[in-house]
Structure formats: structure tokens, C-alpha cells
Image (tube, helix red, strand yellow):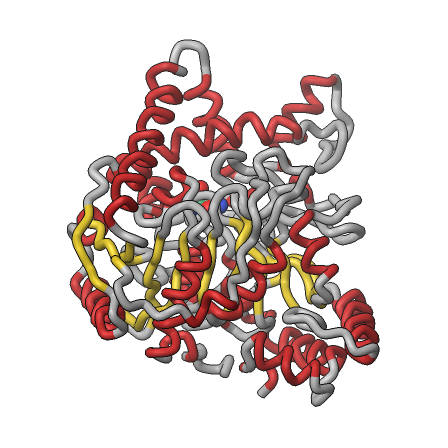
Amino acid sequence: MLHNLFIGELAERLTKRQISSVELTRHLLSRIERLNPGLNVFITLTPERALKDAAAADARLAAGETGPLLGIPLIHKDIFCTDGVKTSCGSRMLDNFIAPYDATVVARLKGAGTVMLGKANMDEFAMGSSNETSYYGPVKNPWDTTKVPGGSSGGSAAATAARLAPFATGTDTGGSIRQPAALTGVTGLKPTYGRVSRYGMITFASSLDQAGVFARSASDAAAVLQVMAGFDPRDSTSIDAPVPDYSKALGTPLKGLKIGLLREFFEGLEPRNAALIEDALTVYTGLGAETREVSLPHLPLSVPTYYVVAPAECSSNLSRFDGVRFGHRCKDPKDLMDLYKRSRGEGFGAEVKRRIMTGTYVLSAGYFDAYYLKAQKARRMITDDFRTAFDKVDLVIGPTTPTPAFGLGAKINDPVLMYLNDIYTIGANLAGLPGVSIPCGFVDGLPMGLQLVGPHFAEAKLLNAAHQYQQATDWHRHAPRGYE
Ligand code: GLN
């Protein structure tokens, strides 16, 4: 069936005119109509826009144009501004916000001829690990609808796993691409900080946020990253460095590749999770890679460090939502202070408020040195640990998450327990490194992810290592029952 094909296979059929983009789009829209009610993947569906995009792609194809994403449907996380389309960031605050321009990621993918099916559900302002903080309700995991899909890009991950679109965009500030990719059994890539433009991507924590991709294979993710990556003068943290040919790098043999096993990742790891990682390492050594143990002594500080830095940045970034310029405004304010207080009080949910309060506290005059400054120092030590490790190895491998998908409601009332979900993913964000999560097996019938993290700008190496694994195994081909 069309929805099971990978991007490369779809592109080939589109180019050969065996299928049209309109036909493919209609197929996915009818699938969405049938399956989305059980998953709650979408905040906004854009079927008319999709059919228009598809017709435009078909016209380009008919004129002889080709392109790896020409005519391919996608879903955007609702954190990316989309011109003329509601962009809510999962919040009541932006429930009435129609973006007046496209994010660079959206513009580039549009230019490549993709077809936008809609905007994906997400944790409010990307704060969460389960998609339960969304104003639009939780997303269900297609592998078991009593379980969370992970977060914050839960809609994008669940949609890709349920084969509602061949790929989706996401953002990763502390794990929000890799963690939901792991819990839904898809491939999720978080590029190096600065590799993909943040222009038009609603900000959570400016020094950590990075856009990336959910797809069903590393080779599909490579095709998408090729379009998304590159310098953008409108983002001052975007890096002006050439973008390598990611797809071309996919054939590189792994012989001699040095894989680091992070001691800190394996300590206390649940035995069934550890066994899957061991199996994956056997595959890698079979492909000629070598493994050695490395240690990042400061990695255990990453969760507390992140939960100072990210809230600090969010408390500053979210001050723009004041009820005056755009977004939610309370009814009949008495005066300006009442307008601010009630607009923000009504517009933000509990987790966002918790982060703003924590962030304001750690930045306050009396506590800045004790918390924020300390956290910045710890962040530097974690970054230096990675640098030392990458002097010895090409990339590091470990689990993406401590457990498979957990039950809806199981952790939402215990923020610290929820925060610990990101224990393996946050280090890469603090150090600005690229990481990918790929499916590597099942625990209790639920998918688990293998995480690969590399040095800055090592996306080609990571994608190649992920691709070689996917050539040797078929975990990435498994579909949740009912969504085959
Ligand atoms: N779960 C983490 C948090 O809540 C990461 C979120 C993200 O990567 N956007 O902050």
C-alpha cells in the first residue's frame, strides 16, 4: 500500500508518473479521516491546502522536474509558523494565532514541492515528554492507545508511526524528537545546533531548540535533512557552513568505525533494554565497527542543568505573550496589569507556568549565581566531556529512553519523574550535538530506540551508521497493528 512506501520509493513512482501526488494525498487524507480520531495527532488539518500543493507538485512533475521530496506529503509540528494557517504551539495562548509568514523550515520544504497535510499536536510550547500538556488533549501511541507517544513532538511521531504521512517535522530542545521517535518506533533526527534555521519556529529555549525530522528510515531522514539544512541569514545562530550530500554518505562502509559506549548510559539500565542495545552492538561489530567504553563524568548533571537553563530561557522568551500584540486576551480587563495577569493566567497551562516560575526564580538577583551561573558551568563541563570522548571515538551509542512508552496519566502529576525521561537525550542538547534515534526492538510489545550521538556536524556519519543498521535489520519496518 502507498502509505507503507518510503520516501525514496514514493519519489520514484511519482517521477515515473506511476502515481500522482494528488492520488497519494487523497489516499493519506482518507487514512487520516479514518485513523486520526483514535490518535488525536492533528491540531489543524489542511486538506484543501494539501490538494492544492499536490496539484502544483503534479504540474512540476509533468513539466519534467524531479526532486527527492517533490509531491511528497508531510505534517508540520504546530511550532512552525505556516503562512495563513493556525499555529498554536499546543497552547490556548495561540489558539487564535494565524501565522503571517512561513518558518524557514516550512518555506524550504514547500519550495522542494512537499504537500502539507496539517499541523501536528504537541506539548504546550514544547514543554513535556508525553504530549499530555497540549491544550488540544493527549496524543495516543498507535502501538497501544492507552500509552503516551512521548513528547513534545508526540503528534509528529505518532503520525509517522501510524503511516499517516511519510515524514513529519519536529523540534528537539531536550529530546523531543529522539524520545517520541523511540516510543513510537520511528527514526528521529536532531541535527547539530545551528544546522537548521530556527526562524519562524516558536521559541522555547533559544540555546537548545533545534528543528529536525521524523521518518521511517535513516535514508528518508537524510533526504529531508538535505532540504531543511543550511545557512539562514534570518537566524543569527544559523551556521554558515556547507551542507554535505547526506544521501551520498549512506553507502560508506563501517569498517573501523569507533563506537563509544557511555558508561553512564549503561549503569542501572533495565536488563531488557540493555539486551537490545547489546544486540545492536553485535550488528555493528558484524559490520566492522569497533566498540570501546568511554565516560562522560558530568553527564549525570545534565537533567538538573537542563531544568535550570531551559526554564530560564523560556521565562524570558515567553514574556512576549502579554495579551497585547497577539495571542489570547482576557475579556474586559480592568487595567493593564489585569490584562497581563489574566491573559497569561488563562492562556498558559500548568507546566508552562511551572517553567516560567522556575526560570524567573533562577534568574532573580539573589539566586542567579547559585543556579543559573552554576548551570552554565555544568553545561560547559558536559560539553567538554563530549569533546574528550570524541577524541577517542567517532560516535557514541546507547538507549534513547529508560523505558518503553508509559501509560497515559502515569507521570503527569509528578514533574520530576516526567523530567527523568530525558536522562539520555538532554546531554546532546546541552552540548549542541546531533543525535538520532532508531528502532532497535521491543519490550512488552512496545518499540524501543537506539540512540547515536556524534560530534558537531556529524549528521552524515550518524545517518550512515543508522542506515547501515537498517540495512542489516528490519526493526524500522514494523508497523503497529491496525496501521499496517
Ligand atoms: N521533555 C523536555 C522538556 O519538557 C524536552 C522538551 C523538548 O525537547 N522540547 O523540556
Q: Quadrant of residue 257?
A: bottom left
Asked whether residue 93 appears in the rendered view, the answer is yes
Instruction: Name the residue nearer the viewer: 432 or 141.
Output: 432
Taking the spot 51% from the left edge, 68% from the top edge, the residue there is 248
In the image, what residue occupies the spot 51% across and 66% down? 158
Q: Residue at x 41, y 58 (%)?
A: 436
Q: Position of residue 124 (x, y in %)?
A: 55, 45
Q: Is residue 363 above or below residue 255?
A: above
**Picture quadrant where residue 183 is located:** bottom left
Residue at image point 69% right, 81% down:
14
Whether residue 74 sits left or right of residue 82 in the image: it is left
Q: Nearer the viewer, residue 365 or 299?
A: 299
x then y, percent, for residue 10: 62, 80
Q: Image check: 35 left or right of 426?
A: right
In this view, 110 is above or below 425: below
Residue 134 visible from this viewpoint: no
Residue nearest the viewer, comparing 214 with 362: 214
Point out the residue furthest to the top here: 366
Q: Count how many numbered circles sit on residues in the image.
A: 0
Q: Position of residue 9 (x, y in %)?
A: 58, 81
On-image quarter of the N terminus: bottom right
Quarter for ligand 1? top left
Horizontal and vertical percent for residue 231?
A: 62, 44
